[in-house]
Amino acid sequence: MGTYTITLKNCAFFARHGAFDAEVTLGQRFFVDVVMHVEADDALENDSVESTVHYGIAYEIVEKVVTQNRRNLIETLAKDIAKALCAWSPQIRRTEIVVRKPSVPIPGILDYAEVRIEHVA
């Protein structure tokens, strides 16, 4: 059948991830990009929402993972997101997750720290 991709770009959430006490206490914004490689099935032919991966529900899953489970590492957070999406829908064959953290606690000037992971279902 083949696959196609669904992308959610720059999803923003407020959460309390990080290894330092101040990050846990204050919290901050995190930005997430999601690419889902989806088994085509009949969606491309029948134009039915039921035949594809509903990206509104996928967003809700990402939001739940980011806002309800605190992690020290954004690497672990990215893996949690990937695993939750693949567990939710067997049509998702592979995910690519990017987590960006703009307020990094290091003595330097930068836009953000970013982690990118790939996960195969």
Image (spheres, grey):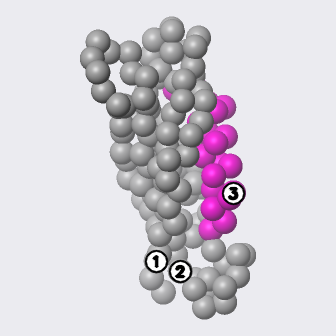
Q: CA distance from mark 1 to mark 3?
A: 19 Å
In terms of secondary structure, where does tag 1 sit? strand
Residue 32, given in percent of the width and then of the height, sits at 49, 44
Residue type, label 3: Ile
In terms of secondary structure, where does tag 2 sit? loop
Q: Which mark is residue 40?
A: 2
**Badges 1 and 3: C-beta atoms under 8 Å apart?**
no
- Of mark 2 and mark 3, the one earlier in the sequence is 2
What's the magenta region?
53-71
Q: CA distance from mark 2 to mark 3?
A: 18 Å
Query: Which residue is painted at 67% across and 40% down in the image?
Result: 64
**Badges 2 and 1: C-beta atoms under 8 Å apart?**
yes
Q: Which residue is mark 1?
A: 3
Residue 100 visible in the current orientation: yes
**Identity of the residue furthest to the bottom in this view:** 45
Query: Which residue is painted at 46% across and 77% down in the image?
Result: 3
- The secondary structure that dominates the magenta segment is helix
Q: Which mark is residue 57?
A: 3
Residue type, label 2: Ala
Query: Which residue is painted at 66% across and 65% down in the image?
Result: 54
Residue 60 is inside the magenta segment: yes
Q: Nearer the viewer, mark 2 or mark 3?
A: 3
Q: Is 114 placed above or below 117 here?
A: above
Q: Is 114 placed above or below 39 here?
A: above
